[in-house]
Image (spheres, helix red, strand yellow):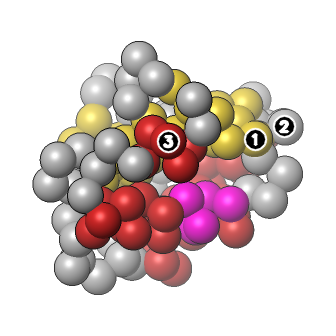
Amino acid sequence: MTPDALLAEHVEPIIELANELRGLMRSAMPAAEERVYVGWHGLGFVHPDAGYVGGIFPGADSVKLLIEHGHMLNDTEELFTGGTKQTRHIELAPGDVVPVDAIMDLIADAIELRAGR
């Protein structure tokens, strides 16, 4: 399955938001490989030095941008809205302002953290 095929299962506002977040991930990690995780219904980004950095998970009403090892990052803007023992995510709905600079900083910090493991 392709990323576009996975996103096609959603309404246009969710597709647009997911694609905006995909663009941020690609911009922050130009060398990363984008992978489709059908079972998780998400798009993952694997950096050549840092490994799996995070993913985008579209839902019915929102899109989650997940950062692997987000629990170790300094979320100064308090963007994280949830997560697991290890991950953290930012949940955005269509119409929300996407905090581009803060997200780019978190991604850069995640890459630095994982590349230095």
- Report the magenta residues as a range: 22-26
Left or right of 105 in this view: 31: right
Pick whichever of labels 3 and 1 is earlier in the sequence.
Answer: 3
At x 64% / y 34%, what residue is drawn?
Answer: 35
Write down the residue under mark 2. Answer: 49
Please state which amino acid type lies under the numbered disc 1.
Glu
Q: CA distance from mark 1 to mark 2?
A: 11 Å
Query: How far across and how far down the image is residue 48, in percent?
Result: 84, 37
Q: Secondary structure at mark 1?
A: strand
Give coordinates of residue 23: x percent, y percent: 59, 67
Task: Give the residue pinned by disc 1.
Answer: 33
Residue corresponding to mark 3:
5
What residue is at 30 percent from the left and 65 percent from the top?
12
| Residue 98: image location, x then y, percent | 36, 77
Position of the N terminus by quadrant: top right
Dots 2, 3 in contact, CB < 8 A: no
* Gap in angstroms between the C-alphas marked 3 and 1: 17 Å
C-alpha span from label 2 to label 3: 28 Å
